[in-house]
Amino acid sequence: MSRLSDAVGTAESSDSATDRVLDVLPDRGDPTWYVVGLAFVLFVGFSIYTSIVHARFGSTGADLGAYTHMFASTLDGEGWLLHGKYRVSQPTGSYWGAHFSLTLLLFMPLFALVPSVYTLLVAKSFVLASSVVLCWLLAREVLDSDRLAGVVTLSYAFNPFLWSAWSFDFQEQILIPPLLFAAYYAYRKEHHLVFLGLLAAVLFTNEFVIFVTVGFVGGLVVAAARAGRLRERAPALVGGFVLVGIARFVSTRVMSYYSEFGGLPSYVVAEPLQPFIESARVSLVDLLGVVLANPVLLIDSTTFAVEQKAVFFAAFMLPVAFLALFDERSLFALLPFLGFAWVFTGEAKAVYYQFGAHYPLYLLPFVYVGAMCALDRLSARFGSIETPSRAVFSGLVAFVLVASLVAGVASGGGHLARPPDAQPDHSETLDAAIDSIPPNASLIAQNDIYPHVATRENAGFIVSQGTFSAYEREYGPVTPEYILIDSQLNQNAPWARTVQRTYADRLGSEYGLYRYEDGIQVFRQGYDGPVRGITSKEPGARRYAPADFATGTGTERNGQIVSTNGSSGDYIWFGPYDILTPGTYTATFRINATDDDADPVLRADVAAGSDHEIVASEDVTPQPGQQNVTMQFTIDETVTDVEFRGIRQGEGQIAFDGVRVNYGSPDAGANASRLAADTTATTIPAEGDG
């Protein structure tokens, strides 16, 4: 046993501070140093990885931006843990209206020293890396075997669900694994007051963990009874249940104080239950009543998306070889979570039963405690496991690594993915756009930009158009001085379109386009002047590459959308569903169309709005080389879902290279359904600049 684990709560006073430090450190040949080294590598690796993801605008307002704003707003005296979201149930905007966490405040002094989003990312990596070391110390205590403890620690350190949660922004739930491992270590050592103190810290990390913890404490009762130590453990176990009750009472009261009402949004409830819900939000008690009144719904809800539930649950259990299901501590902890995820939540919150986002952090420490205890009982029955040979140890390590890989593939990797491609020019332009907005001005930014403006006192963001619209219906319009949108950023995500559609009827009227460049749009309240650039005087053109469009009968090939044959009326490409404010525009399509006769082979058009009304159109005839097909049009009101489409008219081969849209002026003189000026088609050499 290492000196580090022996020293917890047992070290005698030494003659000097140096001696005390040396007494705590493991021996030079102790395997604890290898675990510390692994934890350090993970700490550095994930600190760098998450920082790169954020620097490339891959982080989100919920969660990283919200937590950054919470700390910044509290330290600046603007309010208490303001998260920048707009929720109808939380008019004060305090995080404690949605979730109650005391331990979150532990990060406040650190953020005060270095008020940066990177502080939170590095802190997250440090906390989760420390949980690897604590997992090792606990496994060593439970299993009394360095090799078995090493296998369990490797399983935890390389667990794909841990890596997924580690990769995703920042949350207070990162404290649950180290606190729970330390709490159970103290319980094993019979330091019951320390155990209760650490268990209280777990319970006050987030109100959702209370349900998991009550199952865990129930499992401790069963385990103590099986071991014949129930009377001996009774004070700690009774204290655990008392703490659960206190945590539930306090969290409920605090959240009620900071919010108008609670409950789950009805749209996240399992689809079979939704017809029985009449309000916009529903409590778990009400949902339980619905199920009890209609028992068949229990089966319908549980079997809804049952294949997904089974696959993700198997993947979640695979790294611990399903051992956690054979221990009462982990099994009882899992039941409340699985009951909620499998019975009450639907496709809109599939993240629960897929163990996505940060939700693995609620369960993994309990799962690994149970796996350790189950493995301890198993090793007592089989000597080859209790004292594994080097060959057996190597086989177990290989199994753990392969199981983690298979689980990661089966679950899709979660949030762990290659960082967004570096776009230094675009990022520089976006940073300049942010800097062009006065620091104290009120601002609404899209979700993936918000973390980069979250330290501003008056910054907010929109997660969901429906949630934001409900807030405005209840409390009136949200009228920031600036709105910041980037349609070229993370184009597979809906964040830019969410803001555009939310403010669609106000963009171009109440909010004028103030600056534009490379898809970045800065709208300013009451602005009625010319559109400026961001890094240059002129606004520049919007450019849409073939990859920005959806394909119908066309096929993406070598950076183009191509179509060699088809029927008249076929949509070869369409999209990208952007938004245009009032003004005069010139759209230039780059097209290569060839055929043996001179009949039109393609119609290129510009359409907008939910009814796809055509605002400009041009027939394209075959020409040698690449053509610039140019259309000028004027719109007098903001239009959404703007498309630049290609529709087959006749036979021939077609290759599409993209669209460039130039903004001419803010003056509007015609209805959006009318073509304001002539459309022309010109032929240029293939190597020309389009």
Image: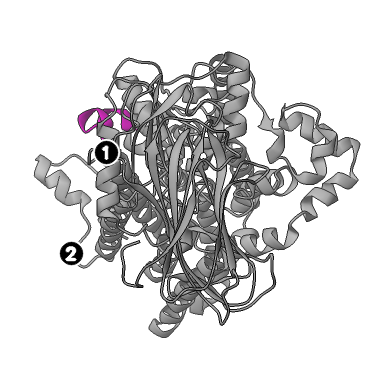
Residue 225: x %, y % from top left: 65, 47
Q: Which residues are magenta?
A: 107-116
Residue 572: x %, y % from top left: 60, 66
Per the model, the C-alpha gap separating discs 2 and 1 is: 58 Å
Q: Is residue 184 visible?
A: yes
Three-letter residue code for mark 1: Ile
Q: Upstream in the sequence, badge 2 or badge 1?
A: 2
Residue 502: quadrant of the picture: top right
Q: Which quadrant of the figure contains the C terminus?
A: bottom left
Which mark is on residue 28? 2
Three-letter residue code for mark 2: Arg
Q: Residue at x 34, y 45 (%)?
A: 124
Q: Residue at x 50, y 79 (%)?
A: 384
Disc 1 secondary structure class: loop
Q: Residue at x 36, y 58 (%)?
A: 419
Q: Main secondary structure of the magenta part?
A: helix
In front here: 419 or 241?
419
Disc 2 secondary structure class: loop
Q: Is 135 situated above or below 290?
A: below
Residue 508: x %, y % from top left: 47, 28
What residue did someone put label 1 on? 534
Residue 36: x %, y % from top left: 27, 58
Front position among marks 2 and 1? 1
Q: Which quadrant of the figure contains the N terminus?
A: bottom left
